[in-house]
Image (cartoon, rainbow, N blue to C red):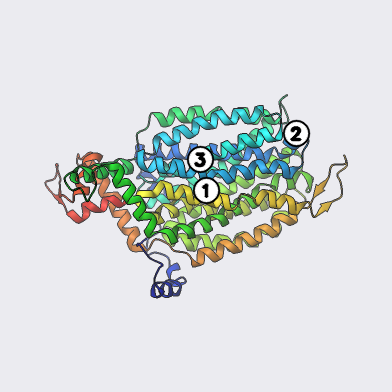
Amino acid sequence: MAAGWFYSPSQISRYFATRITSLKPPKNKLRNPYAVLRELTSHQWLMFAAGFLGWTWDSFDFFSVSMTITEISEAFDVSYSDVSWGMTITLMLRSVGAIVFGILADRYGRKWPMIINLGLFIILELCSGFCNTLPQFLGVRALYGIAMGGLFGPAAATALEDLPYEARGILSGLFEMGYATGYLLAAAFYRALVPTTFHGWRSLFWFGAAPPVLIIIFRWYLPETNHFQVMKAQREARANAATNDSSAGGSSFRIFVRDSMRDLRENWVLFVYLVVLMVGFNSCSHGSQDFYATFLKDQADVNATDTTVIIIVGQIGALFGGCILGYISTFFGRRLTMLVCCLFGGAIIPAYILPRSMSLAASAFFQQFFVGGVWGPIPIHLLELSPVALRTFMVGLTYQLGNLGSSASATIQSIIGERYPLPASADGEQRFDYGKVIAIFMGAVWAFIFIFLLLGPEMPQEERDEEAEAAMLLERLRAEGLSLAEIGQRSALGKELDDAYSGNQVDKAETTHIEGV
């Protein structure tokens, strides 16, 4: 986005006057997704897989709490709303991790911040299973929130920033559905471990500490992203060129700080908007999922096995929705695609909470299809709107501040639900009308997201075309024998790049445009 896009009265008037017309789909031909994905190199697939796996296990660990609220409340002899603070405090502290690890990832690379986060996952997930009191559990989940918050930005950058432009929509949707995949796995392993093992809910947390070991090994053997290597070389070249110019500064660290402060100063309104938008998106996820298992078990009288089936079917719907609508967003526009999802998601709410049979599986599939669908374009939407120098920081922090803004969703729903009691169950257990709470909450959230998407910005088609050309140029230069470091150094200095193999020359303007890849 252009710097200062929202500051003058004339810009504000022009901006709001074009919110409807800007929804016009780009003049892109809808390509076969198989053909789009075939263009990916092995490096791009491996980097995507590493980011996807990290984000999936982030989700699994979070939903380990929501899946076991009933069991944990019984073990600690506390209410559901008390246990739900385990989710709330995790969400509240994720923004701290996003700040710390986002800055580290933009300064030093995406690889090691991600590995450190996964290492913290192992330690804190084990500790969660050994807690004997609610205060201990909440303390561990608070620390866990910091680790979880630091993962999204590096994982998203790892997965997406080296992709060809036309593949970014569909793989953005698939990446975001790592969240649904984690929920699906949490539901499946809840059924496999919690009712069947001696240690019950603790077994789920202990199991959750094992897969990050494999993800760490996988990421260890992969390189840094191409994008970051080029950006690092650019900074170093600028620092070397400025050593004799005291006004320009002489270190890549000082250049990083200067670029970062400039981008924050020029894009602060955009930053605030994205935080508000992500509050709505995170509330959508938590509102539709956090208490749905409790609703099925306590109110819809669905047994543990059928509860697992319904949740898994819903998350399969989210997977399809994220991939399909993420792919469509590349050719029909990010905002238009997400706005349509809001309309359909709101219309399906009654079917999501009214039936009292296994037909809820179909309702869950379609509701989560549109929850996943509205989320599908978000990772690439955030990347496209974020300034290059602070890409990981801004993507991670806006997402996690949105989590912070929505952190009380579970507790709010729990407290409101306790105001709508239902007759006690056959064994005397108290029940609440969580179906009504979910319907009210989700109706408000869908409307909130619709309004802010309608009023919000989107990368214009001209900039999308430039992004696509820059990504193609980078791959062409690498194929012609130039290293990533050389590409970054020469583009930073504005030099013409000699084509070592064909004898052609790359135009100076074309070279410097690589910085936006």
Q: Quadrant of residue 2?
A: bottom left
Identify the residue under disc 2: 76
The residue pinned by badge 1 equals: 400
User: Taking 353 as reference, is 211 above or below it?
Assistant: above
| Residue plotted at (66% across, 32% down) | 136
Location of residue 157 in the rendering, given as x and y in whole percent from the top left corner: 41, 44
Given the image, on which type of amino acid does mark 2 rest?
Phe
Helix, strand or loop for disc 3: helix
Q: Residues within 10 Å of mark 3 (few under 14, many from 20)?
A: many
Q: Residues within 10 Å of mark 2 (few under 14, many from 20)?
A: some
Between 4 and 226, which is closer to the camera in this rendering? 4
Separation of residues labelled 3 and 1 (CA atoms):
13 Å
Disc 1 element: helix
Q: Which of 498/316 is in front?
A: 498
Q: Is 76 on the left or on the right of 24, as rendered?
A: right
- Name the image quarter holding the N terminus: bottom left
Question: If you read the primary sequence from the N terminus, does the residue marked by circle 2 or circle 3 appear first?
Answer: 3
Q: Which mark is residue 55?
A: 3
Find residue 508 and report its horizontal and vertical position in percent: 17, 54
Q: In the rendered image, is residue 354 in sight?
A: no
Looking at the image, which residue sits at the far top? 198
Q: What amino acid is labelled 1 in the image?
A: Gln
Dot 3 amino acid type: Trp
